[in-house]
Image (spheres, rainbow, N blue to C red):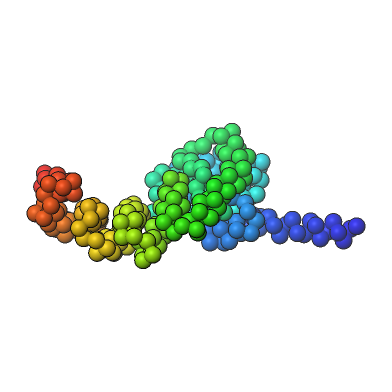
């Protein structure tokens, strides 16, 4: 009987998603690998050494032993925004601290910014597993539908986007853009989405390549004009203003009466007025 209890206790320890005696890990990849095995949610905390509110949270709600115990039951990771810049962009972190509660597949189901009172934080932690399981069930259903019909992959990508998962959505939209089994128009629609996702994550070179691939599918489709207009936006984000102006000028010359042409004319005027 003792041997059985010892083996059971050992197995439960191995299933624990916490990392040693620390409340937070700094290994993003390991956290999701563990989540796939233990089916526990992932909790990402974006923070910084210079963030005063982060210090207040750490000394306040996050210092409570019961709260720490609840955090340890999840796959919890603390990420310094100065060290994890790509992840900071990917998850659109604008305020610190930011907490992201995520399912094992990486779907964000709860996002908090700045200071969170202890009772609210404890409530989020208490409901995390139930919300994570619900999200995973919905995602699995969408994936099964998409497996039968590739054009339905967009529903999976939109599900990720709805929850603020630009990186995951971009991967799916990019796959649809490249899929020759799908018609040109649906591929171009996916292209618009992937350009937007890359733009918002500040992956500008990927966005420009997606513009090129979207336009060449059918240069005469209005979506091609839309993609070209977004190209100007990407150049502006890169502070390549001469290139942006060239894009807008070409649209105004070639398709002045279309929505893209009119939007380009408006943007040109705004650039001149700045």
State the count of labels: 0
Residue 37, given in percent of the width and then of the height, sits at 64, 59
The reply to whether residue 226 is in sight is yes
Q: In which quarter of the image is residue 131?
A: top right
Residue 85, given in percent of the width and then of the height, sits at 40, 57
Residue extending farthest right:
1
Residue extending farthest left:
253
Residue situated in front as seen by the camera: 10 or 185: 185
Question: Which residue: 60% across, 53% down?
Answer: 75
Question: Which residue: 81% across, 60% down?
Answer: 7
The reply to whether residue 169 is in sight is no
Question: Which residue: 66% across, 41% down?
Answer: 66
In which quadrant is the C terminus drawn? Answer: top left
Residue 242, given in percent of the width and then of the height, sits at 14, 58
| On screen, residue 61 above or below 44 | above
Question: Which residue: 65% across, 56% down?
Answer: 38
Residue 229, given in percent of the width and then of the height, sits at 21, 53
Left or right, residue 14 beside residue 99: right
Q: In which quarter of the image is residue 82?
A: bottom left
Residue situated in front as seen by the camera: 215 or 111: 215
């Amino acid at each position: 009987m003792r041997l059985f209890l010892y083996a059971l206790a050992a197995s439960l320890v191995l299933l624990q998603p916490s990392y040693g005696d620390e409340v937070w890990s700094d290994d993003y990849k390991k956290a999701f690998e563990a989540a796939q095995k233990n089916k526990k949610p992932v909790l990402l905390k974006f923070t910084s050494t210079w963030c005063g509110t982060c210090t207040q949270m750490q000394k306040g709600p996050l210092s409570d032993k019961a709260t720490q115990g609840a955090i340890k039951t999840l796959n919890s990771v603390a990420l310094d925004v100065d060290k994890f810049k790509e992840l900071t962009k990917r998850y659109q972190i604008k305020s610190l601290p930011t907490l992201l509660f995520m399912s094992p597949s990486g779907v964000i189901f709860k996002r908090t910014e700045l200071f969170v009172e202890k009772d609210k934080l404890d409530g989020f932690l208490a409901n995390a597993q139930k919300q994570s399981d619900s999200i995973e069930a919905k995602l699995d259903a969408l994936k099964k539908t998409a497996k039968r019909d590739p054009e339905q992959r967009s529903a999976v990508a939109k599900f990720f986007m709805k929850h603020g998962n630009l990186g995951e959505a971009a991967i799916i939209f990019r796959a649809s853009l490249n899929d020759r089994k799908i018609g040109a128009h649906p591929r171009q629609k996916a292209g618009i989405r992937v350009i937007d996702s890359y733009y918002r994550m500040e992956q500008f070179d990927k966005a420009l390549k997606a513009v090129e691939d979207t336009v060449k599918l059918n240069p005469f489709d209005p979506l091609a004009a839309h993609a070209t207009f977004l190209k100007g936006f990407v150049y502006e984000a890169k502070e390549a203003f001469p290139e942006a102006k060239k894009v807008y000028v070409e649209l105004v010359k070639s398709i002045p009466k279309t929505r893209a042409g009119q939007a380009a004319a408006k943007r040109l005027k705004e650039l001149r007025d700045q």
